Each structure stands twice: as structure tokens, then as C-alpha cells.
Image (cartoon, rainbow, N blue to C red):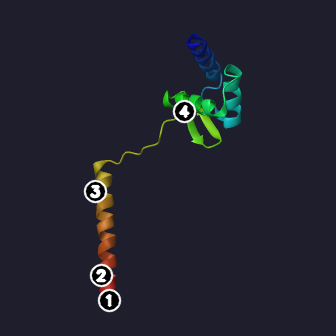
Amino acid sequence: MYLKVVISMNLLLEELKKYEKKKITSDILIGIIKTYYPHYKDTSIRWIIYELSKKNVITKISSQLYFIGKLKVYNPLFSNVLSKDIKKLLETILNLLCMNQHV
């Protein structure tokens, strides 16, 4: 039984490679999984989706949309100069607000 599950997972991974770097709906993803695991219940299918996500095979975009592969999360890096400029700007705004309250 264990060998059959491993073989099915390998076949599933090969199938998902065809969709690499593409978005697919959860219905399509579930259909692909059910091709290799036809007797699994919905809860077991959700565990497979969880495992695929954990292994970065898929990335959940929304409740109904998945990206095959790993999406890079946009994380802007602020330079120290920019951080200092923002801090000065916020201090200036705060000072202006405080001065307006006393007028």
C-alpha cells in the first residue's frame, strides 16, 4: 500500500510539472489529484493539497486559485537612507500636527 501511494505521488508530481508556473483553480487541482487517488475522500485530498503546499510544489493564491510552483513574495527593502528620510518626514508631520493643536 505504501509503495502504491509513493508511486501515485510521483506520478502526481510529474503531472503538476505540466502546469508549472501557471495558475489553476482548486477544482482543476482536485480533479488532477483524484486521477491518482480516486478512492480518497475530500478530507484526504485537502491533506494532499496541504502537503504539496508545504513542499512548495503549489502556492495558494486564494481559496479557489493555486499557482504551480513557488511564488516569490514581494518584500521591498528600504535602504538606511530611505528609512532615515521617512523617519524625518514622520517627525515633521507630527511636529506640524502638534503645532496646529496649539493654535
For the residues marked 4 and 1, what is the alpha-carbon distance in whole angstroms?
59 Å
Q: Is residue 74 above or below residue 89?
A: above
Q: At which x and y percent is residue 77? A: 37, 45
- What residue sits 67% from the left and 20% below the top? 36
- Identify which amino acid the numbered label 3 is placed on: Lys
Determine whether label 1 and label 3 are within 8 Å by CB: no
Determine whether label 1 and label 2 are within 8 Å by CB: yes
- The residue wearing badge 2 is 99
For the residues marked 1 and 3, what is the alpha-carbon distance in whole angstroms?
29 Å
The local crowd at label 1, few if under 14, some if 14 to 19, many if 20 or more residues have their Cα within 10 Å, is: few
- The residue wearing badge 4 is 50
Q: At which x and y percent is residue 71? A: 52, 35
For the residues marked 4 and 3, what is the alpha-carbon distance in whole angstroms?
41 Å
Determine whether label 4 and label 1 are within 8 Å by CB: no
Q: Secondary structure at mark 1?
A: loop
Q: Is residue 68 above or below residue 82?
A: above
- The residue wearing badge 3 is 84
Query: Which of pointers 1 and 3 lies earlier in the amino acid sequence?
Result: 3
- The residue wearing badge 1 is 103
Choose top left, top right, bottom left or bottom right for residue 23: top right
Describe residue 16's horizontal placement relative to residue 82 as left or right. Answer: right
